[in-house]
Image: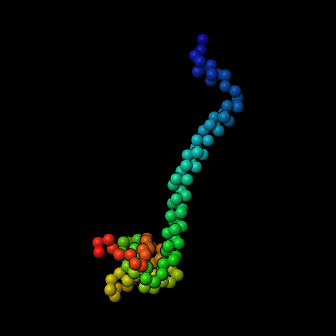
Amino acid sequence: MSSPPTLMMQATPAGSSVFAMVNFAMPMLLVFAVFWILILRPQQRRVKEHQAAINAVKKGDEVITAGGIRGRVTKVTDEDAEVEIASGVKVRVIKATLSQVLSPNAKPAND
């Protein structure tokens, strides 16, 4: 006499491999969908917003570069921005290296 699980395995129809494949694929698709909704879509949205802010940078905006340098934009071209980091000290930076664009009226928290 065989045990019940052994009988069930012996009695499985030939089409069960397709059922097993679908049984495996559905949870994987569900995991991917949740991953897409919770992680990829918000990240893509943030990238688009950041790119729009960088493209809209104008004279007078306060910016922070990827290196952590904070300054005020004095001149903008298609690819570059001239940033005044101290009185009379201006540097040219590539707009793609700007990590944050602050409002022109922003004041430091410790003032």
7 over 100 or under it: above or below: above
Residue at 33% across, 74% down: 108
Where the C terminus falls, by quadrant?
Answer: bottom left
* Image height of 20 relative to 55, above or below: above
Q: In percent of the image, x 51 and y 77: which residue is there?
A: 56
Q: As displayed, is residue 41 above or below residue 101? A: above
On the image, the x and y values in percent for residue 33 come to 58, 49
| Residue 21: quarter of image | top right
Q: Quadrant of residue 105?
A: bottom left
Residue 32 image point, x, y percent? 57, 48
User: For this rendering, which residue is in front, 67 or 62?
Assistant: 62
Q: Residue furthest top?
A: 1
Q: Residue at x 40, y 74 (%)?
A: 64
Q: Is residue 56 left or right of residue 23?
A: left
Question: 81 or 102: nearer the eye?
Answer: 102
Furthest-bottom residue in view? Answer: 88
In this picture the colour scheme is rainbow
Count the marks: 0
Position in image of residue 101 (x %, y %): 44, 74
| Horizontal relation, residue 85 to residue 7: left or right | left
Placement of the N terminus among the 4 image quadrants: top right
**Residue 110 % position (x, y):** 29, 72
Residue, x 61% and y 41% (percent of image)? 26
